[in-house]
Amino acid sequence: MVVWDLLGYETVGRAKRDQEGQAINAQITISLDIPDVRVLDIGQNDRGDCTITVESTLEGTKCRKCGREIRELHGVDEWITLRHLPILSRRVYIRVRPKRYRCPWCEGGPTTTQQLAWYAPKSPHTKAYEKYLLLQLVHATIEDVSIKEEIGYKAIEAIVDRWISGEVKWAEVKRVQILGLDEIALKKGHRDFVVIVTARSATGEVRVLAVLPDRKKQTVRQFLEAMPKRVKRAIRTVCTDMYEGFTMRSRKC
Ligand SMILES: [Zn+2]
């Protein structure tokens, strides 16, 4: 049996006895990778997926009308369920009831739902899971990922759409050793291709830097030119399945 000891939550260690009657300590610790939450419960649904119930530990929100910080709790919204990163190949769902606050200054006392940084409004996934899916798309197709993750084609396209932006918080980007540029074909729609830009650090960690709206040379060039010198200098290889001809050394991967 695996017992998850999640971020900010102490589980009681459980042990399973094997045939010889010896206790096997099978407890592991996995970070939930979600800030500002308290885990209330860990369970399993009918399919054997892991369900983690959490509550926000943040207090207050900004009034949607006047923008002021409000702290008068009005209650909680309906449950929302968000797919999160898998644990040991199991699907994981986070359940949360968003908090709602009332504004004492605005006329009629309108209420505002607290928005948390780790999921986008109306998205059925956590941002961490969406980033994970984007990474799965590298060297794969949307169909591949759709089958592997058991998630609809359109849902993945919607995620790709949501993440399209050439903007990168470069201050948060550590030393990039290998820059990856992978074009992803989309079905007929308003776009044919997007480019997923990934960064591999010296320690081998790979992360998605950006999703570019098309595969035009100009778009890619603009992205590369906007890259700070510090980052550019450290890059040893540009790994791409696209055309060659960047200013930096590139190779087909
Ligand atoms: Zn207000």
Image: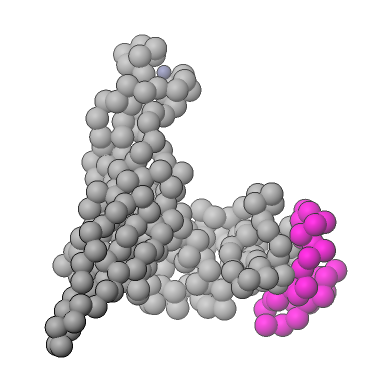
Quarter of the view holding residue 193: bottom right
Q: Position of residue 116 (x, y in %)?
A: 42, 41
Left/right placement of residue 143 relative to residue 179 reads: left
Please report the bounds of the magenta region as a residue range: 224-253
Residue 167, placed above or below residue 102:
below
Please state, as top left, top right, bottom left or bottom right, where the N terminus lies in the image: bottom left
Residue farthest along the bottom direction in this orientation: 20
Instruction: Based on the picture, tell me whether residue 235 belongs to the magenta stretch.
Output: yes
Most foreground residue, 49 or 148: 49
Q: Residue at x 63, y 60 (%)?
A: 209
Q: Residue at x 44, y 64 (%)?
A: 156
Most foreground residue, 98 or 143: 98
Quarter of the view holding residue 174: bottom right
Q: Residue at x 26, y 57 (%)?
A: 11
Please state, as top left, top right, bottom left or bottom right, where the C terminus lies in the image: bottom right
Left/right placement of residue 240 relative to residue 75 reads: right
Residue 66, placed above or below residue 28:
above
Residue 26 visible in this rendered orientation of the protein: yes
Taking the image as four quarters, which one is ligand 1 found in? top left
Q: How is the image coloured?
A: one colour
Most foreground residue, 208 or 23: 23
Q: Position of residue 89 (x, y in %)?
A: 35, 74
Residue 236, placed above or below residue 66:
below
Q: How many marks?
A: 0
Residue 242 visible in this rendered orientation of the protein: no
Instruction: Based on the picture, tell me whether residue 212 belongs to the magenta stretch.
Output: no
Quarter of the view holding residue 235: bottom right
Q: Residue at x 51, y 65 (%)?
A: 134
Q: Position of residue 145 (x, y in %)?
A: 44, 74
Q: Position of residue 95 (x, y in %)?
A: 27, 51
